[in-house]
Image (spheres, grey):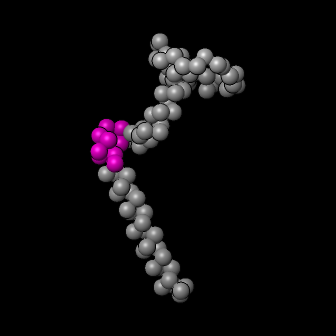
Amino acid sequence: MVRDMTSKMISIRDDIYKNLKKLKNPNESFSELLERLIENQRKDPLKHFGIANNLSDEDLDDFETSVKEGKKKDAIISSSKFSEIWGD
């Protein structure tokens, strides 16, 4: 997909350039690579970590919901314990 061809010059370290070059598909521009990486990171950040890499979108949503619920429960328990120890 070709978009507006306005360009910006950016500076990156050589090691970063080499890593980006390894990630780039043969017929992909660096702009397309960066766009793909940004889009993938926005969509499914958990897919890049361990077993989450092979989970369906539905399973990832369930996992994220469970994590959020767990954090809420932990906050309630922590608050309760704090109140027990330190008072209201």
Report x, y in % for residue 21: 55, 19
Looking at the image, which residue is at 58% across and 19% down? 4
Looking at the image, which residue is at 32% across and 41% down? 57
The answer to whether residue 38 is left or right of residue 57 is: right
Looking at the image, which residue is at 70% across and 25% down? 11
* Number of on-image labels: 0
The answer to whether residue 50 is left or right of residue 38 is: left
The answer to whether residue 53 is left or right of residue 42 is: left
Report x, y in % for residue 83: 50, 83
Q: Main secondary structure of the magenta part?
A: helix
**Which residue is more in the foreground, 28 or 4?**
4
- Could one spot residue 51 in this view of the protein? no
When asked about the image quadrant of residue 53, the answer is top left
- Residue 21 is a magenta residue: no
Is 28 located above or below residue 11 in the figure?
Answer: above
- Residue 53 is a magenta residue: yes
**Which residue is more in the foreground, 13 or 60?**
60
- Could one spot residue 72 in this view of the protein? yes
Task: Please give the range of residues in magenta.
Answer: 51-61
